[in-house]
């Protein structure tokens, strides 16, 4: 080493490959070019005014110190009540509900708590990018089961799911509604997944953060509500997507006492807990969110339809977004085989940013022709975006 050179960054081997992401690159492109950012999945409007006022009131009332390690009691009670009303799953807020620093932290804590070195985790591919990093940090191995395009939606092959399970498989991770495809798993699909969990004695971890964002008359279902699954499922969700407050980072996990105790053991050494005034504010909101979530769902469905129609008019082939903030589009009609190449050209060519879907895949030979657009933006923003895309398409 020369006298003025710095040592190489000592990144542990389990984190190599998880450096700066395509999200950072696309965001930088958006900033540099002034492009409309439809890549990142956060809304550009605030949540309910009453909820925001409740958070300010909680700060003024002095709820500014550490919450209990398992979260504010009122919020745990509200989460338990909400799950029972909507899914029929009963949880004791005293030991079967854990409030976390966002759902992503809950998922990471679950892997750290439940996954030993060499254990395998089944996940449907493509999948949210934090999953593979969290599994790797826990010393586990992600085993992807592909979601393949069938018509205008995505589905999995039950035989491929069965074939992915080995004697080392310990956990199955299910994200529904699904990011990035926008898929909502059907009851029949959940029954296949539940049968695999029973047959192979697997613990299921469910990421349900988009549970209220389902469209066209659909309703989200929880794997935990299927017969025999409540006591082998850790159901994870949060407030960010439900109330359009993604920056608050308040999530929760519900499950049998033995699983919650394990996850809390890991979570307390990651963040202990956080967001006391936000937890206080959310406790009341979660008891009475029906009108808000109904309006949000209707608004997002309209925004989805606006963007999907605009993309089709611009020449893209568009897949059905059954839920979430996202829809998938095939770039080949634009003369590209590679979504990465299109996404790098799109800010200059059309003034719009998207995310290449290949970055979400973990398996071999992923499809490279898909990109993900986010429609959780104001109608005026989406209108400008689709007009720009249509103009660029010629």
Image (spheres, grey):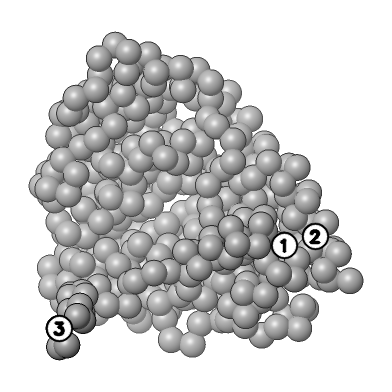
**What percent of the width, then of the height, locates residue 9?**
21, 75
Mark 1 = which residue? 351
Q: Residue furthest top?
A: 61
- Label 2 with label 1: CB-CB less than 8 Å: yes
Residue 52, placed above or below residue 20: above
Q: Residue at x 26, y 40 (%)?
A: 100
10 Å neighbourhood of mark 3: few (<14), some, or many (≥20)?
Answer: few
Residue 66, placed above or below residue 103: above
Which one is nearer the viewer's eye here, 127 or 91?
127
10 Å neighbourhood of mark 1: few (<14), some, or many (≥20)?
Answer: many
The label on residue 388 is 2
Q: Residue at x 67, y 36 (%)?
A: 298
- Label 3 with label 1: CB-CB less than 8 Å: no
Alpha carbon separation for disc pair 2 and 3? 52 Å
| SS under mark 1 | loop
Position of 152 with respect to 155 (left or right) is: right
First-in-chain label (3 vs 1)? 3
**What percent of the width, then of the height, locates residue 186?**
52, 56
Position of 373 with respect to 9 (left or right) is: right
Which one is nearer the viewer's eye here, 13 or 93?
13
Q: Residue at x 42, y 40 (%)?
A: 247
Mark 3 = which residue? 3
Alpha carbon separation for disc pair 3 and 1? 46 Å
């Amino acid at each position: 080493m020369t006298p003025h050179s710095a040592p190489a960054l000592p990144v542990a081997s389990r984190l190599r490959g998880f450096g700066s992401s395509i999200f950072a690159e696309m965001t930088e492109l958006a900033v540099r070019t002034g492009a409309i950012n439809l890549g990142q999945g956060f809304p550009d409007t605030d949540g309910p005014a009453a909820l925001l006022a409740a958070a300010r009131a909680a700060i003024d009332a002095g709820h500014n110190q550490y919450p209990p390690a398992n979260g504010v009691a009122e919020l745990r009670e509200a989460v338990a009540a909400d799950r029972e009303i909507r899914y029929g799953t009963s949880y004791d807020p005293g030991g079967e509900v854990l409030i976390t620093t966002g759902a992503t932290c809950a998922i990471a804590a679950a892997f750290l708590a439940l996954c030993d070195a060499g254990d395998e985790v089944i996940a449907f591919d493509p999948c949210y990018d934090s999953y593979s990093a969290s599994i790797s940090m826990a010393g586990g191995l992600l085993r992807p089961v592909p979601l393949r395009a069938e018509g205008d939606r995505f589905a999995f092959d039950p035989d491929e799911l069965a074939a992915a399970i080995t004697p080392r498989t310990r956990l199955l991770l299910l994200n529904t509604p699904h990011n990035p495809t926008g898929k909502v798993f059907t009851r029949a699909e959940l029954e296949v997944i539940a049968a695999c969990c029973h047959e192979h004695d697997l613990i299921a971890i469910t990421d349900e953060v988009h549970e209220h964002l389902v469209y066209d008359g659909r309703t989200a279902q929880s794997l935990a509500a299927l017969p025999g699954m409540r006591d082998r499922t850790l159901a994870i969700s949060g407030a960010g997507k439900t109330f359009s407050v993604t920056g608050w980072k308040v999530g929760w996990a519900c499950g049998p006492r033995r699983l919650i105790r394990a996850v809390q053991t890991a979570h307390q050494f990651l963040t202990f807990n956080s967001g006391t005034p936000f937890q206080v504010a959310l406790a009341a909101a979660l008891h009475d969110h029906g009108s808000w979530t109904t309006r949000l769902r209707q608004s997002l469905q309209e925004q989805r339809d606006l963007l999907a129609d605009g993309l089709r008019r611009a020449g893209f082939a568009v897949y059905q977004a059954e839920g979430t903030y996202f829809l998938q589009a095939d770039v080949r009609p634009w003369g590209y085989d590679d979504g990465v190449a299109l996404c790098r050209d799109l800010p200059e060519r059309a003034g719009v940013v998207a995310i290449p879907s290949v970055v979400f895949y973990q398996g071999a030979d992923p499809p490279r022709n898909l990109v993900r657009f986010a429609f959780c933006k104001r109608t005026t923003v989406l209108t400008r975006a689709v007009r720009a895309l249509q103009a660029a398409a010629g």
